Image (cartoon, grey):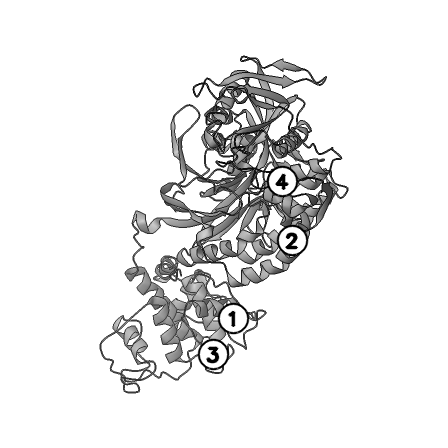
């Protein structure tokens, strides 16, 4: 908790006192003459704007001061930091003219009121009561004795009166009396206050602070790309609670893509996620591309707007224009707001934390228009809008700025990514990112701009996917808002105990999801779609041989991917290690489809050369005829290899399937568009050539769930084959 701030105005009062000396001046009060013993002090307070008197032109110096009046004048004279809550006293309502002053004194421990819970603002204040208030404001102490016979050690006001006497702020009502229970007159009050201000002017030194004391510490908790993995939220709730308990100054942020990916979304369209997010108390969320997945439905973005309206936190994005979609009318404010409303969209927000302003603005990838059904929602250039955002926040006195982004850590440089954002835009201290599902165990530091010149540090963080981790980054800012220290880590949610209340919340959603998991999709299999694993008795394996199941999965991938590009998708590839279960004969259920592809992988488009594809298939068959998790199932082509040859020299030919059923040989120098899953596209299973393509921006993650794509293909009216087609052939096995 912050210490009480005392802004002494003694300089102004002292100046008024000096001006009075030797000068004929007049208070203007008809009942305060120069002969009055308190005249100069009343004049000084009047000149300083601390007292005004009554409407009839009088000051009434002999009239008793009420407790409410005393509170108001003390707060005004000593410029005490205003309280923020309501008055704790039953007889001081918010409408009371003295409410704010009384609350200020109460919040700083200067007053406590009476045992019955009242303050009695209209009751006259006694000299003893006033003495105690003044010593607390000035933080005075005393250890000696006083000559007053009407108080003694142990008296309720003794220590306060000793402190005032020893510091020269009172002489008592006589040489031997203090009169602690006598009322304070308005004239006496003026003299007390002026003496107190004069003492403060002489004895209060401006606080000196070290750089460490001027520093501001902030802990940022973050997730991204949770994709409706609601089952992770009870453990996430525990992790958030534990981190908040350790870090008083904290923020909880979501970097987009709460929508799509599991049955929890299919059934509840974001409402299950939202209930947990509201319970955890997120501070802000930005939009991911998947938040727009339902835009092509009959209801358009209705599910998204319902999510926004139900959120107990603001959603932020500086580069999305919602103005042409009437569903968003009244939800969007083109501003950087200090005071925000739940269920609204802002360019950015300003959070006040421990007296410091922290600005947060959002960005969403421009690729969204190609990855989702955006309708009339438009996306603007991220660099231009980020520069505007930083300027707008700095204009409001903010020097600690967070960009909450869904553009990818080191994603397609032709469109947008976080590293380029950090290098191109000055003033961003931390980028909390999403979209590329990167697992950044530590903050990535950008301290140079686009031409290599040094710049203030920008930290980039991202917490992988699916609620597997809670990202944490602890940042220390200096007084100018520059990052001076930082530390960050990912907390593995699987190792955290589930929150009991969260488990109860999950149960209501889980029951319905399990019912749907058992729901039949409308496809009946005459024979099982096997997913064999090799053994000594039978080496045939999904990780070494073409299978019907692998063919169906890749056919569905290729068909789906073709809907998202104007280029011809010539092939689709699926790693055998990602196919986890067979589907038995009979009516197929949703749950069975999910168990085949349980990892929540997404569909990606890649531009690769013929030479790169040939190198990839060498990796695919490197262990043949033994198993390899990276063995690639194929749609749209035919691969012939010879497992008897040395590793790296096994591929005999790769051919592309033409529309007329013929095949054309792959050309090394030609670039082809293929579909695969995001795991493989990023270099999983040792596909370094794909990793390089990803780094060069030749991969676009469409973000479409693999099991949903597969289910869609099974229900599209296709004939389920009963044998493989010779797409992958080992000539050594003949």
Classify residue 324 as left or right of residue 117. Answer: right
Q: Classify mark 3: residues with Cα within 10 Å, few (<14), some (14-19) or many (20+).
A: some
Precedes in sequence: disc 3 or disc 2: 3
Residue for point 60% across, 60% down: 507
Dot 3 corresponds to which residue?
63
Dot 1 corresponds to which residue?
87
Could you tell me which secondary element the residue under label 4 belongs to? helix
Dot 4 corresponds to which residue?
707
Question: Which of the 4 image quadrants contains residue 207?
Answer: bottom left
Residue 673 image offset from top left, x and y in percent: 60, 22
Could you tell me which secondary element the residue under label 3 belongs to? loop
Residue 451 image offset from top left, x and y in percent: 42, 23
Classify residue 268 as left or right of residue 406. Answer: right
Nearer to us: label 1 or label 2: 2
Real-space CA distance between mark 2 and mark 4, rounded to the nearest whole angstrom: 15 Å
Total number of numbered labels? 4
Precedes in sequence: disc 1 or disc 4: 1
Whether residues under marks 4 and 3 lie with C-beta atoms below 8 angstroms apart, the answer is no
Residue for point 50% across, 76% down: 121
Nearer to us: label 3 or label 1: 1
Question: Which of the 4 image quadrants contains residue 598?
Answer: top right
Q: Classify mark 2: residues with Cα within 10 Å, few (<14), some (14-19) or many (20+).
A: many
Real-space CA distance between mark 1 and mark 4, rounded to the nearest whole angstrom: 58 Å
Precedes in sequence: disc 4 or disc 3: 3
Real-space CA distance between mark 3 and mark 2, rounded to the nearest whole angstrom: 75 Å
Please give the label number shown on residue 513.
2
Q: Classify mark 1: residues with Cα within 10 Å, few (<14), some (14-19) or many (20+).
A: many
Residue for point 35% across, 49% down: 214
- Residue 290's place in the image compared with 449, above or below, is below
Whether residues under marks 2 and 4 lie with C-beta atoms below 8 angstroms apart, the answer is no
Q: Residue furthest front?
A: 537
């Amino acid at each position: 908790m912050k210490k009480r701030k005392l802004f002494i105005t003694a300089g102004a009062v002292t100046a008024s006192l000096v001006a009075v000396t030797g000068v004929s001046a007049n208070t203007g009060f008809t009942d305060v003459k120069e002969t009055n013993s308190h005249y100069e002090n009343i004049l000084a307070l009047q000149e300083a704007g601390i007292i005004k008197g009554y409407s009839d032109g009088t000051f009434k110096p002999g009239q008793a001061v009420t407790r409410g009046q005393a509170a108001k004048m003390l707060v005004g004279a000593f410029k005490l930091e205003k309280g923020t809550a309501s008055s704790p006293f039953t007889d001081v309502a918010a409408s009371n003219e003295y409410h704010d002053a009384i609350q200020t004194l109460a919040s700083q421990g200067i007053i406590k009121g009476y045992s019955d819970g009242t303050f009695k603002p209209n009751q006259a204040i006694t000299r003893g009561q006033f003495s105690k208030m003044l010593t607390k404001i000035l933080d005075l102490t005393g250890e000696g004795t006083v000559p007053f016979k009407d108080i003694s050690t142990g008296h309720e006001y003794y220590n306060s009166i000793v402190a005032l006497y020893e510091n020269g702020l009172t002489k008592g009502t006589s040489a031997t009396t203090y009169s602690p229970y006598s009322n304070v007159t308005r004239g006496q009050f003026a003299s007390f206050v002026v003496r107190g201000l004069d003492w403060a002017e002489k004895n209060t030194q401006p606080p000196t602070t070290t750089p460490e004391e001027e520093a501001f510490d902030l802990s940022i908790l973050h997730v991204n790309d949770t994709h409706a993995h609601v089952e992770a939220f009870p453990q996430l709730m525990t992790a958030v609670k534990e981190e908040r308990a350790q870090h008083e100054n904290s923020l909880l942020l979501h970097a987009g893509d709460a929508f799509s990916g599991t049955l929890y979304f299919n059934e509840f369209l974001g409402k299950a996620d939202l209930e947990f997010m509201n319970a955890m108390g997120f501070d802000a969320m930005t939009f991911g591309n998947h938040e727009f997945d339902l835009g092509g439905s009959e209801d358009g973005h209705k599910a998204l707007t319902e999510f926004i309206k139900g959120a107990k936190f603001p959603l932020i994005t500086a580069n999305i224009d919602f103005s042409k979609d009437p569903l968003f009318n009244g939800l969007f404010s083109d501003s950087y707001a200090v005071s925000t409303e739940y269920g609204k969209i802002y360019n950015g927000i300003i959070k006040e934390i421990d007296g410091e302003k922290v600005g947060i603005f959002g960005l969403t990838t421009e690729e969204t228009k190609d990855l989702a059904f955006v309708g009339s929602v438009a996306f603007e250039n991220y660099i231009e809008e980020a520069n505007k955002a930083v300027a707008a926040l700095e204009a409001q006195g903010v020097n600690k700025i967070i960009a909450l982004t869904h553009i990818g850590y080191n994603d397609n440089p032709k469109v947008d990514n976080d590293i380029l954002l950090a290098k191109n835009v000055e003033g961003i201290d931390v980028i909390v990112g999403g979209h590329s599902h990167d697992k950044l165990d530590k903050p990535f530091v950008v301290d140079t701009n686009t031409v290599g010149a040094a710049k203030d540090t920008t930290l980039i963080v991202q917490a992988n996917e699916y609620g597997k981790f809670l990202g944490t980054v602890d940042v220390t800012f200096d007084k100018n808002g520059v990052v001076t220290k930082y530390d960050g880590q990912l907390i593995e949610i699987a190792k955290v105990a589930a929150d009991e209340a969260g488990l109860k919340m999950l149960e209501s959603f889980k029951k319905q999801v399990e019912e749907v998991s058992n729901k039949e999709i409308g496809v009946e299999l005459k024979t099982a779609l096997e997913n064999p694993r090799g053994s000594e008795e039978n080496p045939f394996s999904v990780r070494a041989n073409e299978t019907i199941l692998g063919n169906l999965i890749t056919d569905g991938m290729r068909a789906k991917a073709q809907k998202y590009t104007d280029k011809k998708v010539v092939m689709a590839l699926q790693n055998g290690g990602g196919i986890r279960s067979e589907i038995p004969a009979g009516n197929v259920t949703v749950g069975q489809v999910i168990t085949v592809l349980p990892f929540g992988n997404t569909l990606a488009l890649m531009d690769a050369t013929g030479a790169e594809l040939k190198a990839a298939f060498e990796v695919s068959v490197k262990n043949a005829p033994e198993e390899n998790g990276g063995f690639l199932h194929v749609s749209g082509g035919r691969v012939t290899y010879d497992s008897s040859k040395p590793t790296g020299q096994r591929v005999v030919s790769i051919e592309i399937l033409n529309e007329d059923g013929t095949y054309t040989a792959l050309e090394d120098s030609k670039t082809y568009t293929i579909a695969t899953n995001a795991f493989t596209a990023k270099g999983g299973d040792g596909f370094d050539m794909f990793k390089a393509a990803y780094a060069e921006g030749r991969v676009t993650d469409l973000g479409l769930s693999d099991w949903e794509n597969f289910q869609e293909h099974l229900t599209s009216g296709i004939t389920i084959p009963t044998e493989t087609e010779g797409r992958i052939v080992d000539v050594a096995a003949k």
